[in-house]
Image (spheres, helix red, strand yellow):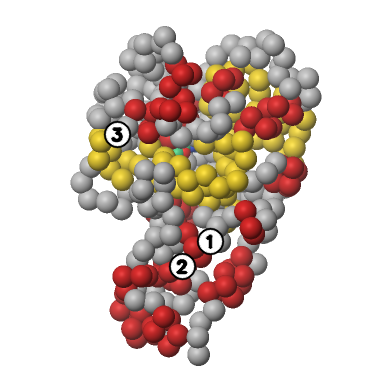
Amino acid sequence: MGYDLAHIWNTMKNKFKSIPVKSSEITPYSQYVSRREFLKTAGVFSGAAALAACAPKGIQSAISEKEAATPYAFDELGDPVNSLDDIAHYNNFYEFTEDKEGVARLAQEFTTRPWTVDVYGLVRNPKTYGIEDLLNKFTQEERIYRLRCVEAWSMVVPWTGFSLASLLREADPTSDAKYVRFETIHRPEEMPGLKSPFYPWPYQEGLRLDEALNELTILATGLYGLPMPNQDGAPIRLIAPWKYGFKSIKSIVRIELVAERPATFWNTVNAKEYGFYSNVNPQRPHPRWSQATERRIGEFGRRSTLMFNGYAEQVAHLYEGMDLIKEY
Ligand code: MTE
């Protein structure tokens, strides 16, 4: 008896709330992951030994070990996407815990529906959007981006989301608007990390308006063709892939257009270590982590860090004339 991957995909997909992405526009989840991993996630088998022992006959004959380990998606530099397991089990989300491997468990019961995002401030059309409005109204696209944390680890993530520019265009900023401020939900009853008195909650972040309007900047609503896992910032988070990961604020409820540079979470905690811009810059050492190299999760050894995380062509012009060592 053969095994029908499309059937597994459909069964899995129905376990999640559907996202309004036309199937023709998105690579199915099954094609992102190695077949081995996909089948494992689908509960068909677990571990290498099980491949021979337990897998249905169709799988044993149809998929070799080598084939099963081949990823389906790569970034534009030719590097494979990280596994869903890595992306969803190695997280920074301090509202839950500072333990990267503990976030997924603590965020499991986090309520992400109903959810609204207020877009307001120096705009002609302020509006409160329900998350379903955002998913339906704005074209959801796939973006495979590198995510580089200032702690000097990195991943390649297949996000789904929509351009922040499209939302801002609808809000219609006035000529006084120079920056965009983002804020994470503050829900102490579900977020045990908020008890920590050492941090200036709620988490907030900011971009200059031209950075926010850059074509790379998205509001991500999912990854791997699935709705965003809670631990990765469900239901909606920012992604600005040329900046250190901490700029990519999770679980956003407020987007405000402002005239002055807004305070940001990590800059408030320690301005010497974390600047407002926080563009990935291998030449600017951080007091605790050299930024010259990084460890790609899932790889041995280190690789060189690229200026603007490899996105110089798209963003270097935003910083012309600036001294990026002083203005970090
Ligand atoms: N957003 C909020 N609200 N809280 C956080 O603790 N951590 C940041 C960023 N966004 C964080 C956040 C940091 S330090 C990083 S590296 C990325 O999220 C990690 O995203 P990931 O867990 O999806 O890999």
Determine whether 56 is above or below 133 in the image: below
Element on which disc 1 rests: helix
Q: Residue at x 31, y 45 (%)?
A: 296
- Label 2 beta carbon within 8 A of ligand 1: no
How far apart marks 2 and 1 lie (CA) works out to 8 Å
Of labels 3 and 2, earlier in sequence is 2
Of labels 1 and 3, earlier in sequence is 1
Q: Give residue 291's position: percent from left, percent from top.
A: 28, 29
Which circle marks residue 305 in the picture?
Answer: 3
Q: Give residue 307's position: percent from left, percent from top.
A: 34, 28
Q: Residue at x 75, y 37 (%)?
A: 129
Q: Residue at x 50, y 22 (%)?
A: 264
Using residue 214 as the reference point, say whether residue 70 is left or right of it. Answer: left
Find residue 4 and report its image quarter: bottom right
How far apart marks 1 and 3 lie (CA) works out to 29 Å
Element on which disc 3 rests: loop
**Amino acid type assigned to the residue bearing label 3 in the image:** Thr
Q: Give residue 272's position: percent from left, percent from top.
A: 35, 17
Find residue 262 and report its image quarter: top right
Determine whether 280 is above or below 218 in the image: above
Which residue is the site of mark 2?
38
Which residue is the site of mark 1?
29
Element on which disc 2 rests: helix
**Amino acid type assigned to the residue bearing label 1 in the image:** Tyr
Determine contact: label 2, label 1, CB under 8 Å: yes
How dense is the environment of label 2, judged by Cα within 10 Å: few (below 14), some, or many (20 and up)?
many
Using residue 251 as the reference point, say whether residue 85 is left or right of it. Answer: left
How far apart marks 3 and 2 lie (CA) works out to 30 Å
Determine whether 211 is above or below 20 in the image: above
**Amino acid type assigned to the residue bearing label 2 in the image:** Phe
